[in-house]
Image (tube, helix red, strand yellow):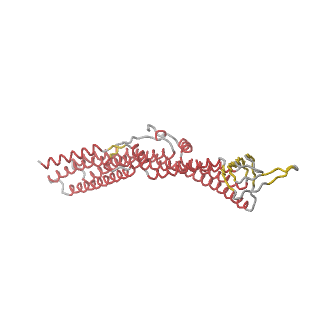
Amino acid sequence: MRLKNFTAAVLVLFACFYAAAETISLDECIERSLKESEKIKAMQESEEAAKSGKDGTVFSFLPTATLDAGIQWMKYKPEQGSMSVAGMSIPVSFPDKSRTLGITVVQPITPLWSVSYGYKSLETAEDIAKLQRELSSDQLKLQVMSLFYNYQLLNESMEILNETKEQLQKYYEQAKNFYDAGVVDKRSVLKIEIEMTKLEQQIQTVTGNTNLIKRNIGILINKPVDSFELEKKEVTEKNLSADNSQLEKIMIDNRLEYKLLEKSENISEYSEMLSAQPLIPTLALVAGYKKNWDAGGSQPENTLFIGGTLSWQIGFDWGKTAFDIKQSKHKKVQTRLENAATRKQLSLQLTQLENDVETKALAIEISKREIDSAEENLRIEEDKYKAKMTTETDLLAASLSLRSAKLGLLTAMYEHEVALHTLAITIGTEYGSITEGGN
């Protein structure tokens, strides 16, 4: 009685545990993985750092101000003197202390040209950091999506394997009855037992892979593997609705790699413009005000001034600047050529992804026909076996053929679904926009 009560309590605890386990959908898995990813968090910090660098450059457009405050005492009082102006002698007194306060404001004009291109470069660097984070996020989405659909594939595969297990058990009972009746020897029973053992091994492999995938997802979403269950999501057959020209246009307009290439070319142009700054004269506006509380003699009480300065550094360092300009031009051309080659590779990748989708769609049709053929062949072999017109070897081969065909169709369906998602995410669009019946 105590053992029964203990068993019942354990079952209740397990029931409560699984009832409390959270069921997570594909979208929730993606959202949580993006939130928990250390790599994405690090890239967000990089993006914020780039933004701070850009925002700090704004202050370079503003004038600089110098504030001077001074106070001095003379140790000995100076003697009175006089100053001759237009033949007249004017007495001049010198104060024994000096208290002054002055402010000077300088606004460079021509250097603002380089500051503006520096700001554009940093602004573009911020955009690149953001695009790189989004690109990493897309890669993580694909990883989670692939794991999620593989988990669903293995679960449905397990259902097929369990059906096969029941089927083999039926064959085993038939062969055992034939053996007990002396119609066949024990080899028929042993053949089926061997096949049942192989099936158990396959079931164990699928179970292990299922647990491994779930643990991997648990790591990505930062949750204990026993604290959640993955929502069941069966795939339905969908077709690619966009042709190659439509897909290429979507890719050119939306793909993140294309935007990164454009940003890199912009930076190379800004660098070329910045390299010419040392050859430009420096023009600056200057204004200031000085207050003297102890004015006397030639020292006025208030001074207000405004003006400008123009300077131009001419020297042998212009030779280095000329080579810097030449170097930046070559780097700009290099960037454009490399980006042109990359664009060709991206276009080729689109063709590969599109072919992958179409190939997996054909694999679905092939698997359907294989299932029809295998089901008919198994029906015939089962009837023949009941009438002892065939051997266990042919019967088991027919059963294995049907099982392989069903697993092949299941694999093709999920691989086709993942290929469609991969294509959509890669070219930067929604899944439903390139599929018939997609959502």
Q: Is residue 281 visible?
A: no
Residue found at the far top of this picture? 437
Which x, y percent locates residue 402?
32, 48
Please tell me which residue lies in front, 301 or 320: 301
Q: Residue at x 37, y 49 (%)?
A: 150
Residue found at the far left of this picture? 1
Residue found at the far right of this picture? 87
Q: Is residue 231 left or right of residue 10?
A: right
Which x, y percent locates residue 393?
26, 54
Q: Is residue 428 left or right of residue 33?
A: right
Q: Is residue 226 left or right of residue 319?
A: left
Q: Quadrant of the C terminus?
A: top left
Please tell me which residue lies in front, 59 or 329: 59
Which x, y percent locates residue 163?
27, 46
Q: Residue at x 57, y 51 (%)?
A: 53
Residue 362 higher or lower than 328, as above or below: above
